[in-house]
Image: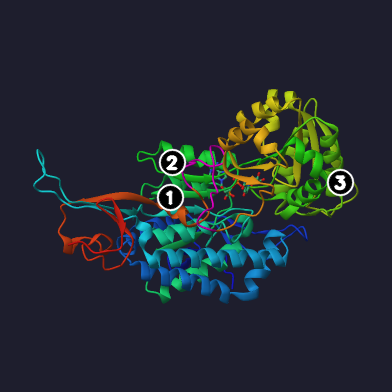
């Protein structure tokens, strides 16, 4: 049941004065529940509880944290149809998407549960003492990863489950041993509260400290700002716009104690259609890309917003096929009037730039909040000169850039801002003939795709979902997959520490049986 209140640790609370409702973009009407924005006092309480909870939670074993994460997954599943119903009501996304996103969310929780139960992720590294070493004896040093402290997670508008309340950021931070305070996304506050109730139930059932999780409502940016500025908050996870992510990053950097902000922001995900592929497979790629550009109404951070090719009759053929194929896709509903407002505004800004040609724009009447898919084209030289054309248009939109030569294409690629993904469409000897294009693209992205589409982010150990700024604020980390846990930890060394007082991961006996580096060798053996 949705109450509209905040979870301050295990307690529901609503002492604030600002209220708001969510919005159903399909019906174009406000939803029924009223939510109360977290007050200053509630923000302080949530952080104080998280800080206290950290003292206990950081010492919970991998087995205990694993049980907690698995219980969260079970409790989310137990929310059943109510969760799916509210998700659809607050996002306008179809039921099938709600179900698949829930599955992804449960899988992420289960994956981190497995990771921390096994335990080797702490990267235990031991160098035993050499008391007789000359001229200076070598001390015993033992290093492992330890949690940072309370983490603030901002729910993402475009993934109400998988990148929000119990999404990848929360699951990885809890797995690392960090309490989490979620700044719920105002567009899906009801979905957020239901998931928060599942996390709280799981925390109570598995004996986790009160304050290990809180969920705060907000209708504007003030709650998020107060959380990021709070001295006891030690890291931030964010998915959303470049302006939002950058504002939070700057705020965190200005604190007396600066903290890391792991923001995953805009990306136009360049796709390079190499000449032989354009000649032999333009029809196939036009069909595939018409689907990819419009998938989820284009509301994915991996949406292909930029397609680069070399001017030719083959590229013209691709553009013409893409235009006709994309018009076959029925316009669909965006997440919120504000999101479609941004889409229309940004689309218009790019479409009205000098030298831009709109080759496809779905015409005819569409329902309120439904987006018309659009493809524009521009010459490579124009694109190079005009940075406005490099901006993300969040929605079912893509731009085909017609380059004069492969050299110009490469020039464009190496001058692009950082991206989450890059894609190479190649046939025959394309790869052999144009290595500089591929090498250039590798320097600008976190993941490079061969003959495929960037949409669809597999959750697995080998995934990199991040990239050079502004795709993310720190390209050394991924927001998806097991390695995303590394955002919430720091390395910590014990020198000459008594064995019985070391954490289990570093003890001579290796009681956890984890893989460790001992004197340069990877092993699960005990020492001595
Ligand atoms: P957003 O504007 O980035 O907001 C995300 C969250 O950050 C919201 O909860 C917002 O708080 C908060 N926030 C934004 N600016 C802030 C600031 N200056 N200081 C503190 N907090 C701030 O994203 P959105 O509202 O979810 O969607 C708007 C646009 O973001 C979309 O149209 C799209 O362009 C982009 N977006 C991109 C991606 C991507 O993956 N690339 C994903 C989602 C959205 P409040 O909501 O409480 O104001």
Asked which quadrant contains residue 467, the reply is: top right
76 above or below 277? below
Mark seen at residue 348? none
Q: Position of residue 124 (x, y in %)?
A: 30, 56
Horizontal side of residue 92 vs 358, given as left or right: left
Q: Secondary structure at mark 1?
A: helix
Q: Are marks 2 and 1 in contact (CB under 8 Å)?
A: no
Q: CA distance from mark 2 to mark 1?
A: 15 Å
Instruction: Quarter of the image for the C terminus: give it.
Output: bottom left
The residue wearing badge 3 is 362
Q: CA distance from mark 1 to mark 3?
A: 42 Å
Of marks 2 and 3, the one in the foreground: 3
Q: CA distance from mark 2 to mark 3?
A: 42 Å
Mark seen at residue 487? 1
Q: Position of residue 299 (x, y in %)?
A: 69, 50
449 above or below 55? above
Asked which quadrant contains residue 374, the reply is: top right
Mark seen at residue 252? 2
Q: Secondary structure at mark 3?
A: loop
Q: Position of residue 211 (x, y in %)?
A: 39, 63
Span shown in magenta:
460-477
Query: Is residue 87 highlighted in magenta?
Result: no
| Residue 413 appears anywhere in the view | yes
Among the two numbered marks 2 and 1 on one chain, the one whose residue lies closer to the N terminus: 2
| Pointer 2 local density, CA inside 10 Å: few below 14, some 14–19, many at least 20 | many
Considering depth in this image, is 4 or 84 the residue closer to the camera?
84
Among the two numbered marks 1 and 3 on one chain, the one whose residue lies closer to the N terminus: 3
| Residue 209 appears anywhere in the view | no
Horizontal side of residue 267 vs 526, given as left or right: right
Residue found 66% across the figure and 65% down from its top? 98
């Amino acid at each position: 049941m949705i109450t509209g209140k905040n979870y301050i640790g295990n307690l529901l609370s609503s002492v604030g004065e600002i209220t708001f409702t969510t919005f159903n973009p399909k019906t174009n009407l406000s939803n029924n529940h009223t939510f109360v924005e977290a007050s200053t006092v509630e923000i302080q309480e949530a952080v104080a509880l998280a800080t206290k909870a950290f003292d206990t939670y950081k010492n919970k074993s991998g087995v205990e944290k694993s049980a907690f994460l698995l219980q969260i997954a079970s409790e989310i599943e137990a929310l059943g149809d109510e969760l799916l119903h509210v998700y659809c009501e607050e996002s306008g996304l179809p039921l099938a998407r709600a179900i698949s996103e829930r599955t992804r969310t449960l899988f992420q929780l289960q994956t981190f549960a497995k990771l921390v139960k096994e335990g080797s992720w702490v990267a235990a590294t031991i160098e035993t003492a050499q008391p007789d070493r000359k001229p200076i004896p070598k001390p015993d040093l033992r290093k492992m990863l330890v949690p940072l402290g309370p983490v603030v997670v901002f729910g993402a508008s475009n993934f109400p489950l998988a990148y929000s309340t119990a999404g990848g950021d929360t699951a990885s931070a809890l797995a690392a041993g960090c309490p989490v305070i979620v700044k719920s996304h105002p567009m899906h506050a009801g979905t957020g509260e239901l998931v928060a109730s599942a996390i709280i139930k799981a925390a109570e059932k598995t004996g986790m400290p009160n304050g290990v999780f809180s969920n705060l409502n907000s209708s504007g940016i003030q709650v998020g700002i107060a959380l990021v500025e709070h001295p006891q908050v030690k890291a931030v996870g964010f998915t959303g716009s470049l302006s939002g992510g950058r504002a939070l990053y700057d705020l965190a950097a200005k604190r007396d104690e600066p903290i890391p902000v792991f923001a995953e922001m805009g990306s136009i995900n360049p796709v390079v259609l190499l000449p032989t592929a354009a000649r032999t497979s333009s029809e196939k790629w036009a069909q595939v890309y018409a689907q990819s550009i419009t998938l989820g109404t284009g509301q994915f951070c991996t949406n292909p917003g930029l397609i680069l090719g070399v001017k030719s009759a083959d590229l013209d053929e691709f553009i013409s096929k893409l235009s006709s194929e994309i018009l076959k896709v029925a316009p669909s509903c965006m997440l919120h009037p504000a999101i479609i407002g941004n889409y229309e505004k940004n689309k218009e800004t790019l479409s009205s730039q000098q030298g831009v040609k709109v080759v496809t724009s779905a015409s005819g009447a569409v329902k309120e909040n439904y987006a018309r898919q659009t493809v524009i084209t521009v010459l490579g030289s124009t694109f190079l000169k005009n940075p406005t054309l490099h901006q993300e248009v969040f929605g079912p939109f893509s731009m085909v850039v017609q380059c004069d030569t492969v050299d110009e294409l490469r020039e464009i690629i190496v001058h692009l801002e950082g991206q989450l993904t890059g894609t190479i469409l190649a046939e025959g000897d394309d790869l052999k003939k144009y290595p500089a294009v591929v090498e250039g693209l590798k320097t600008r992205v976190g993941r490079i795709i061969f003959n495929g589409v960037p949409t669809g982010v597999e959750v697995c150990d080998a995934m990199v979902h991040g990239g050079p700024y502004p795709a993310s604020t720190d390209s050394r980390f991924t927001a998806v997959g097991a390695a995303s846990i590394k955002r919430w930890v720091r390395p910590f060394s014990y020198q000459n520490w008594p064995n019985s007082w070391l954490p289990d991961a570093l003890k001579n006996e290796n009681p956890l049986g984890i893989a460790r580096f001992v004197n340069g060798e990877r092993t699960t053996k005990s020492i001595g």
